[in-house]
Image (cartoon, rainbow, N blue to C red):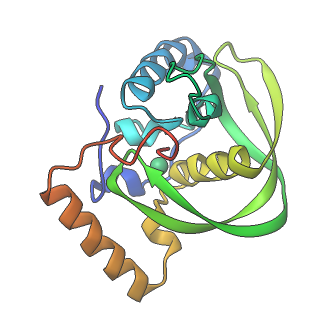
Amino acid sequence: MHIITVPNPALRLKAEEVSPDEMKKIKSVAKQMAKLMYKSEGCGLAAPQVGLSKRLVVLDVGQAEEDENGEEPPKNPVFYVNPQVRRLWGEKTVGDEGCLSIPGITIPIERYNNIIVDALDSDGRPFTTEAEGFHARALQHELDHLEGMTMFEHLDPIERITYFQDYEAAVAAGAKPGDTGRSQST
Ligand SMILES: [Zn+2]
């Protein structure tokens, strides 16, 4: 398993629902994705980013916190299978985001401050997450991946060209997934 990057067309596909009989397999895929996410120093990873067109996300926003003593933050991955947005609200703010599939650059993206998501965990049990701020931003970023949307699709055509040139330059300079840093890459 490895992280695919823009412009791989697999990143533009709308991901498929996970069916009940796929849950067992999804659990082992989810574990591998979490491992890969930590290795890449990201705080979120969606299945389309590993070339799997399924509605599965791994998120650990604790990974984005400051390491005051230079220690590794504790790992607490949360798995979202078939996530559904129940509510999206609050102030919209622009923040710089990184993406493991767009290494080497960050892009300012406008997001809502608050979100409620219903999903299944990796054992198929339903749960609900209410998030705000960075946590809400990271969830919205991952859910976009399930719709086949990367950060570039948030930009207007002129911005898209500019940021894509920056991205190509970063890749030419050797940028790899995770290079935008632990605090941002999802
Ligand atoms: Zn991303």
Number of disc labels:
0
Question: How far across and how far down the image is residue 158, in percent?
Answer: 39, 88
| Residue at horizontal 75 percent and vertical 51 percent from the top | 133
| Residue at horizontal 63 percent and vertical 34 percent from the top | 61
* Quadrant position of residue 127: top right
Q: Nearer the viewer, residue 143 or 166?
A: 166
| Residue at horizontal 70 percent and vertical 17 percent from the top | 124
The quarter of the image holding the N terminus is top left
| Residue at horizontal 54 percent and vertical 14 percent from the top | 27
Q: Is residue 100 above or below residue 125?
A: below
Most extreme residue toward the bottom is 158
Q: Is residue 179 above or below residue 104?
A: above
Question: How far across and how far down the image is residue 88, in percent?
Answer: 82, 58
Question: How far across and how far down the image is residue 107, in percent?
Answer: 46, 65
Question: How far across and how far down the image is residue 17, in percent?
Answer: 59, 37
Q: Nearer the viewer, residue 8 or 60?
A: 60
